[in-house]
Image: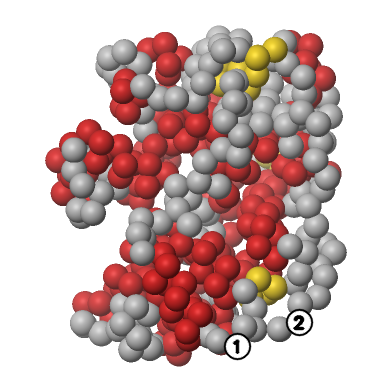
Amino acid sequence: MERHSINDLTLLPSIPTVKAKEKAQSFDFDDGQVHMSSHEQRFRMFSSVEYEGQLYMTPQNFIESVTMSEPRHKRPWRSLTKQELEKILSGTPPVWRGSSKLFRNLRDRGIISYTEYLFLLCILTKPHAGFKIAFNMFDADGNQMVDKREFLVLQEIFRKKNEKKGRKGDAEKSAQLRADESITIDTTLLVHFFGKKGKAELTFDDFYRFMDNLQTEVLEIEFLTYSKGMTTISEEDFAKILLRFTNVENISSYLENVRQCIPDEKGITFDEFRSFFQFLNNLEDFAIAMQMYNFAARSIGQDEFARAVYVATGLKLTRHLVNTIFKIFDVDHDDKLSYKEFIGIMKDRLHRGARSIQNAAACLLTSASRHWHITPTLSALHWLPVRFWVQFKILFLTWCCSLL
């Protein structure tokens, strides 16, 4: 198969990291930290900057946290001075100059707090139809503009409600993730949204463009990892990307399915790649449609799959993309997909590693085998599965905002 060079998705050259003093801290976790949530664990694992006792990610750290299983380089946290932080933030572009290369342009020249990390994760899994809802949650006074104060109010709700109460031995470790209630430290997002003086206001159009650009940037990075400058990736590489961050243990058998069923490689274009992940962000709506077939003890064929995607999400997937999805997940080779074959695996993928960390922590606490079904273990620990925890958090935040 011939693949042509693609110019508009090229990665920018590496930008030197900001020099800072290094502290003798490592990424190793002791037993006390198993009580932290999966998101807290992942934030600590990938963060590389410390300022005034708080941990921060750089834009590069965030990109790695959602595209890689573990940090590219495990090294001590860098301690920034006030002057170094001011110099870093001075290069942050305003929101109207944002692009789908923002995080790649900034690389290590920026800081992202834990609550902002939660906010960015929410963006990555939100369908475009939900962007307006997200904006309205920040727009407390309903004037179709969000100022810095409104943004910080919702961030404070995120922070307070995410804290774990009564965790023994965790106080010192968790303090590094929490912001001091009396101090607001300017971060890359705050400067990007509200300017260096914090006086600018954020419009919905700018907010929508930021969210769309972030989703696009992460997808471009994942695509480029395998395309290496070409216009397509192979069907096998597409399968590798889909099965990343899932609990599938026999990935090799899925890849073998692709090699045998698609011997003549045609390739997946970036438009097809992006349309699939836009569909994945609407997975809950699609799952309802597919659940109807599950209740009737029926599997779903390719035409029915494409129709269900369009009805539930408004997206039209190409015939080749649908065929590739079936060849990856149709483990019994009946040219049908069951709810178990597809939905369960893709829900893991949607959360980009958070759920797998939660399951691993549950197994560690209970000495359960990782081969056992995880739901009874989570129930015994009174832990919500990630998808229900996210739904609960959104409903709870909405209720809190209604009280403001």
Residue 29 visible within the image: yes
Residue 374 vs residue 88, the one in the foreground: 374
Image coords of residue 64 (percent x, y): 60, 43
Q: Secondary structure at mark 2?
A: loop
Image coords of residue 25 (percent x, y): 53, 16
Disc number for residue 2: 2
Disc 1 versus disc 2: distance between alpha carbons?
A: 12 Å
Three-letter residue code for mark 2: Glu
Disc 2 crowd rating (10 Å Cα; few below 14, some 14-19, many 20+) is few
Residue 357 vs residue 255, the one in the foreground: 255
Image coords of residue 126 (percent x, y): 52, 54
Three-letter residue code for mark 1: Asp
Q: Residue at x 43, y 40 (%)?
A: 398
Image coords of residue 313 (percent x, y): 50, 71
Q: Is residue 334 above or below residue 159?
A: below
Q: Residue at x 37, y 12 (%)?
A: 171
Mark 1 / mark 2, whichever is N-terminal: 2
Relative placement, left or right, of 293 versus 259 is: left
Q: Residue at x 25, y 49 (%)?
A: 370
Q: Residue at x 54, y 62 (%)?
A: 241
Residue 309 visible within the image: no
Q: Secondary structure at mark 1?
A: loop
- For label 1, the residue is 264
Image quadrant containing the N terminus: bottom right
Indicate the quadrant where residue 10 lies: bottom right
Indicate the quadrant where residue 3 lies: bottom right
